[in-house]
Image (tube, grey):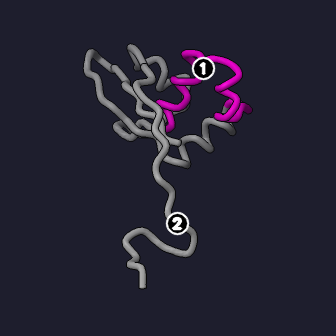
Amino acid sequence: MQFILEITKDGETHEVTTRLPDVVNYETFTGREITSWGERTPGVRDVAVLAYYADTTAPREPFEVWLETVDAVQLMDVTTPTPTKPGRSPGQRSK
């Protein structure tokens, strides 16, 4: 599962897509699993934490410091990438 987020800082907006480490870091930081989002609508803090881990445009600062520099965050889309078939790596041909 990947989340596409928009982050606005200093009036400039950029889009980020989460990777697996970002989601794992979110779950560790919040103590909540992404799969629990179906039970409850994610809040602004949930989206902000995901955006924090996915944002690679600035040096890593503590979350609270990073958050002070952000004007807005928005969840744009959720995608589910097609998994690789068992026993094959991406780009590997069938025999």
Per the picture, the main secondary structure of the magenta-coloured stretch is: helix
Q: Nearer the viewer, mark 2 or mark 1?
A: 2
In the picture, measured across the screen, residue 55 lies left or right of residue 28, that is left
Q: Nearer the viewer, residue 20 or 70?
A: 20
Decide: is 68 above or below 31: above
User: Are there few (<14), some (14-19), or many (20+) residues within 10 Å of tag 1?
Assistant: few
Residue at 37 percent of width and 71 percent of height: 91
Marks 2 and 1 sit apart, C-alpha to C-alpha, by: 31 Å
Residue 52 in the image: state x and y as whole percent.
Answer: 49, 31
Mark 2, secondary structure of its residue: loop
Residue at the extreme front? 95
The residue tagged 2 is: 85
Taking the magenta stretch, the answer to whether it contains residue 83 is: no
Residue 42 image label: 1
Residue at 47 percent of width and 26 percent of height: 66
Residue 54 in the image: state x and y as whole percent.
Answer: 45, 38
Tag 1 or tag 2, which sits nearer the N-term? Answer: 1
Q: Nearer the viewer, residue 40 or 26?
A: 40
Q: Nearer the viewer, residue 83 or 15?
A: 83
Residue 78 in the image: state x and y as whole percent.
Answer: 47, 33
Q: Nearer the viewer, residue 42 or 51?
A: 42
Decide: is 53 above or below 6: below
Residue at 49 percent of width and 63 percent of height: 84
Residue kind at label 2, given as amino acid type: Lys
Magenta span covers which residues? 30-53
